[in-house]
Image (cartoon, rainbow, N blue to C red):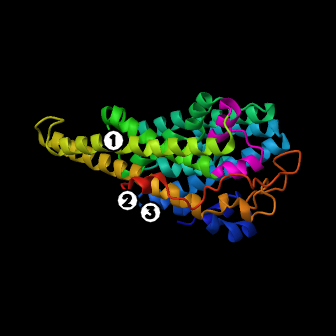
Amino acid sequence: MKSKLWLQEKRLMAPAAAEALADELRYTDLVAGYYLGATDAMLGAIADFSSWFFAWDDRHDRDVAHARTASWRALCADLHAALRDPGAHLHHEEPLVAAFADCLLRMGQPMPPSWRRRFARHMGPVIDAYDQEFGNRLSRTVPTVAEYLELRRLTFAHDIWLDLLEAVAGAELPASVRESTAYRTAGLACQDFAAWYNDLCSLPKEIAGDELHNLGISLIRHEGMELAEAVSVVHQKVAGRVTAFLEAEKELRALADSLADGENGGEGDGDEIDRERTRAVLISCTDNMRNWFPSVYWFHHESGRYRVEQWEDPACPPYLQDNAPARATPAVRPTETPRVGRQRGPHEQEGTV
């Protein structure tokens, strides 16, 4: 994977910043841990897309900091247009749009049109959810816990990362498998774990940066919790997603076994080949859902993106591409925030993931 070079070529990160910070941020290491079995081309495309996603997230933060509403809304419109026709946006003047189009083409190229259409249907609401967060931050609106959990499944792009499980496996799953209760439960559990564990580890920097979108912040604002209590509740919710995944995983393994035994399908040679292909894709997707847990845990304790204690200004991480403060008043280093880093993860307590 050459995402550090790609970030520079696509003008998403200045060469000096990329050389100094890209390796420490560990973006490509994260993807390599939870998309095992991908071809080199697909893994490279997903790694670049993941790096793009972080760059887009940072642009979102900077546009809020500068109150660049027109610029942000134009970017959202251009991303929607690139989603409809990526080939026409490969040389767009906005680096985030051109890089997005590049990723779309590379990830979608080996997949059938039905998968590409589904991916686009899932990505559109992600762009809109980021725009909703933009408006919330300008109006100083903290979503309720229920509102936040719904919004988070979009801003974290749950369905996008689940779609990419199939791209890694090299084929679509039948809708009957992909939309089954066990598959949806397992998929949402691994993605909720990743999103909420990110909230847990991001809480110090997001308090410092005057962010409003974090499960802990919603619990504090709307449930009347103290900081330590909110951290504990988020940790419990994260652990609960591990348990939910393990239960659903058993059902997915049983479904894979039934495909091997011919319990789902006809008797012809073609049916047997289809069952074997579906079984292989299902096993790959299930294995990589499981891989999300240790990879996400590792990333949050190795990436420089969350080392607030090492930054000169906790409200302005060094990997950002400009120096605009994220708040009007100087940030207070959140020394009272319970330390999340280096504790045992919920999957380690379980001893099974």
Please say if the residues under marks 1 and 3 sit with CB atoms less than 8 Å apart: no
Where's residue 142, x and y in %?
A: 71, 32
Give the residue type that dot 2 points to: Gly
Task: Report the residue at 52% width, 61% height from top.
Answer: 298
Q: Main secondary structure of the magenta part?
A: helix
Where's residue 178, x and y in %?
A: 36, 36
Q: In this view, does 169 lie above or below 180?
A: below
**Element class at badge 2:** loop
The label number, if any, that marks residue 247 in the structure image? 1
Task: Report the residue at 76% width, 39% height from top.
Answer: 72
Q: Circle 3 is placed at which residue position?
A: 40
Closest to the observer, 313 or 66: 313
Give the residue type that dot 1 points to: Glu
Task: Report the residue at 62% width, 68% height from top.
Answer: 23
Q: Compute the Cα span from label 2 to label 1.
A: 24 Å
Where's residue 82, x and y in %?
A: 62, 40
Give the residue type that dot 3 points to: Asp
Where's residue 135, x and y in %?
A: 75, 32
Whether residue 147 can be seen here: yes
> Position of 214 compared to 68: left or right?
left
Q: Give the range drawn in magenta.
A: 202-224
Closest to the observer, 346 or 308: 346
Q: Circle 2 is placed at which residue position?
A: 37
- Could you tell which of marks 2 and 1 lies nearer the N-terminus? 2
Residue 244 lies in magenta, yes or no?
no
- Could you tell which of marks 1 and 3 lies nearer the N-terminus? 3
Q: Residues within 10 Å of mark 1 (few under 14, many from 20)?
A: some
Question: Residue 65 lies in what quarter of the image?
Answer: top right
> Position of 128 compared to 350: left or right?
right
